[in-house]
Image (spheres, grey):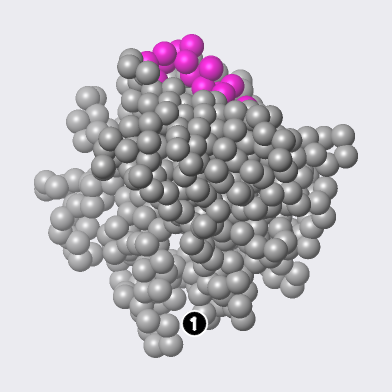
Amino acid sequence: MKKYVALLCFVVLIAFNTSYSQSEVKLNLQPGTPQLTISKHIYGNFAEHLGHCVYGGFYVGESNTKIPNRNGVRLDVVEALKKLKIPNLRWPGGCFADTYHWKDGIGPKDKRPAIVNRWWGGVTEDNSFGTHDFLNMCELIGTEPYLAANVGSGTVEELTDWVQYVNFDGVSPMSKLRTENGREKPWRVKFWGVGNEAWGCGGNMKPEHYANIYRQYSTFMADWSNSDRLFRIASGANSSDYNWTEVLMRDIPQHMMSGVALHHYSVIKWENKGSATNFSEDQYFATMKSALFMDELITKHSAIMDKYDPQKKIALVVDEWGGWYDVEPGTNPGFLYQQNTMRDAMIAGTTLNIFHKHCERVRMANLAQTINVLQAVILTNEEKMILTPTYHVLEMYNVHQDATLLPLELKSTDYTVGTEKLPAISASASKDKNGVVHISLVNIDPKKAQDVTVTLDGKAASVTGRILASATMTDHNTFENPDKIKPVVFKGAQLKGNNLQVKLPACSVVVLELK
Ligand code: AHR
């Protein structure tokens, strides 16, 4: 089989209507080309104590008899996330993380103090979902936990204790407490965020100040040689704040951090974000422009990191990304509940293709957020649960997880609105451990289909694929019609000698498999 997929080099020609050769993709796997892996961790998710992400989303409570659950965690969600293969899950925030005191969330549930979630709706939480609940849930889902620690309003001791509580196997005050609370063996959490958005809700700090604070917290989280191999992630820049990355890279010793974060949301205007479902083509265009800006952001932040870390030891961790719109009418503005349309599928497909392209530096990322918040993969309503178009894109794309990147050069036709234009096509390719090649293609143009010619250097015996598409870009799944948008078999790709002809419908995501 391998001989069929020895795609040493391929060219994709993309053309609209019958005029070919306007666009070109070249894939170069000449001997000596570095073999880069697309880390599965760029497919991470994010679960904040925000609206109905945790309470009412993941967790419905042990006493709930209407919704099947294990220890209060709903089982339909667990099954859906297993299928999605989410590699890591960030918790408990977000902004919430820098107000969260983890000791409030351990021990008998009826003894836990109630707290006020001051960032998100000012609601009172009973702390029934805490450290054990989250880490046990991660085991159930089969995902690695990524704990975001409280730096903004916490203490070094509090964080040091948390690390000891969840990770230490020997005799210590915190491991004793953990055992008393029902868990003898540590969970061994590897991923740790040292604060969140320290430039904003995490403390309104200047980068120089945060860099110092980071050094202090980071010192006491690990021993001198970091023998537990904690993956410590510094709170990163807000979108194009390149100075933030510069200062962190300059002022934090490299052995003290494994990753620097970056947050970027696809938003039209913060003061007028627009409806999630009822949007014009201009608004669609603006959202996609913001989503595609991720490529420039990563390129520029990476260039700064390259100056200090040419060997790329430190990962760029895009631990918040996704579309952000106005909340659904009638819902709590502090809960950030929004529907999810084909526009979100376009954001997901193009963003993941961008992450693949930069996989040497971007080795972890987290979609915001998993359930009922922002660009969710799952929406719930009491016992009902639906999967969003974004879910389906992540599921179709998970074939790229830990696969070898097949680098490509893409010259795409334009998607034009008025005087502005964006590349209509986004593409990515990888080869998995069995030698199977996957190509993901996105056509963001909501009106025009594209004819795509993939020229292969080497032969493939067969091509199969799946497509996610719908009649209009505002289409979405609802509790009444949960399967309106779902992947179906794609019959629009044909092998012709060394060429692959693909008919890519408007506003669609396709993943092809070549054997
Ligand atoms: O994801 C919602 C919020 O967006 C997070 O809490 C915060 O980190 C970001 O500003």
Q: Position of residue 234 (x, y in %)?
A: 45, 32
The magenta stretch spans residue 295 = yes
Towards the viewer: 411 or 18: 18
> Which residue position is annotated with label 1?
383
Quadrant containing the N terminus in the rendered view: top left
> Residue at the location (52% across, 79% down)?
384
Q: Quadrant of residue 339?
A: bottom right
Amino acid type, callout 1: Glu
Please give left or right for residue 299 compared with residue 309 in the image. right
> Residue at the location (60% across, 49% down)?
503
Q: Residues within 10 Å of mark 1 (few under 14, many from 20)?
A: few
Note whether 223 is above or below 1 in the view shown.
above
Q: Position of residue 23 (x, y in %)?
A: 64, 30
**Magenta span dominant secondary structure:** helix
Q: Is residue 263 visible?
A: no
Towards the viewer: 378 or 450: 450
Q: Is residue 77 visible?
A: yes
Q: Note whether ligand 1 is within 8 Å of mark 1.
A: no
Please give left or right for residue 149 compared with residue 448 in the image. left
Q: Position of residue 109 (x, y in %)?
A: 35, 72
Please state the total of marks drawn on the protein image. Answer: 1
> Residue at the location (52% across, 49% down)?
493
Residue range in magenta is: 294-318
The magenta stretch spans residue 59 = no
The residue at the far front in this view is 497
Towards the viewer: 387 or 407: 407
The residue at the far right in this view is 418
Towards the viewer: 432 or 5: 5
> Residue at the location (28% across, 46% down)?
189
Element on which disc 1 rests = loop
